[in-house]
Image (cartoon, rainbow, N blue to C red):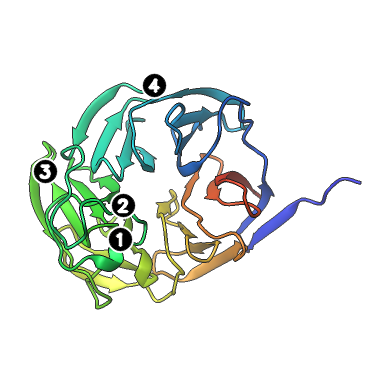
Amino acid sequence: MAKTAEIVGAGRHRYEVREDWAQVPEHITLLAASVTVDSQDRVYCFNRSKEHPVVVFDRDGRFLHSWGAGLFAFPHTIRADRDDHLWIVDRDLAQMMLFTTEGKLLRTIGKRGYRSDTGVSPTDFRSDAWRDVKRGAEPFNLPTDIDVAPSGEMFVTDGYGNARVHKFAPDGTLLFSWGEPGAEPGQFNLPHSIWIDRRGRLLVADRENDRVQIFDQQGTLLEIWPTKLIGPAILYVDAQDVVYIPEHNSGMVSVLDMQGNRLAHWGDAAFKSCHGIWGDARGDLYVVRAGAWGRNRRIVKHVRL
């Protein structure tokens, strides 16, 4: 008897879940950290593997190729930009790297392995090192994400060992930073992701404060969204200004409007550590999530109904 397809979501945001979408070759172990999709609907998995750190699939899950062997220490996030280049954040190397889709390095932001003085031990790479941050400091201390404005200015969340957002000029010069550890408005406990919306506002996933904070590009706090999110990990905003957020600490996915109101919600609290999400041109989603006990993180496709 055929297994009934799992349907999740609500309203205009309903999806058929395809757990085994990715056709992973036997010689590759998938330990997915993050996912992005380019303009040709090629899907890029940033993979915690020394031999195959960037694994590329087509939209039907067929394996295309992999690249980046030996280049990374701790894959954290990956995102395709408007030019179909790939920004990659290596948390432990404390670097943001821009690549072509074929793996040619174009530029690097950050000094390899540098740890700023935030009170966190320079030998501490724990995922909960954010608990020991005593003060905000300069770039970087285990950074998490990057987004680039149309002006070319770059914004980086510096989260696991720091509590700041850094703004860079297009040439990579640091302009200024803001943020201190804490739970008050404008403070951060693990700023984990950033997205520049069409109005130029900065959406920041303040993961361990269970919230999204909104800033202007000068670092002024504009608002805090009303919906509580249990460990918001990554922000993805589609062309209709719908916001998709995997919740790392609950195993859920939330869909929100631009006022922070929840439109749909699904997942399984038994499988926490949702760590990535991106959509393709047809509105399908690719979600980085854990599986049954002992199963590695992988990419689960959600086909829009």
- Whether label 1 touches label 2, CB < 8 Å: yes
Measure the alpha-carbon separation of dots 3 and 1.
29 Å
Using the image, determine if residue 226 lies above or below residue 16: below
User: Few, some or many C-alpha atoms within 10 Å of disc 4 (few <14, some 14-19, many ≥20)?
Assistant: some
Label 4: which residue? 102
The residue at the point 48 percent across, 49 percent down is 277
SS category of the residue bearing label 3: loop
Frontmost of labels 2 and 4 is 2
Frontmost of labels 4 and 1 is 1
Q: Horizontal placement of 10 versus 217: left or right?
A: right
Label 3: which residue? 169
Label 1: which residue? 129
| Amino acid beneath label 1 | Ala
Measure the alpha-carbon separation of dots 4 and 1.
34 Å
| Amino acid beneath label 2 | Phe
Q: Horizontal placement of 247 versus 15: left or right?
A: left
Frontmost of labels 3 and 1 is 1
Label 2: which residue? 125
Q: Where in the figure is residue 87, as x and y percent of width and height?
A: 31, 37
| Amino acid beneath label 4 | Glu
The residue at the point 27 percent across, 24 percent down is 105
User: Few, some or many C-alpha atoms within 10 Å of disc 1 (few <14, some 14-19, many ≥20)?
Assistant: some
- Whether label 3 touches label 1, CB < 8 Å: no
Does residue 189 appear in this view?
no
SS category of the residue bearing label 4: loop
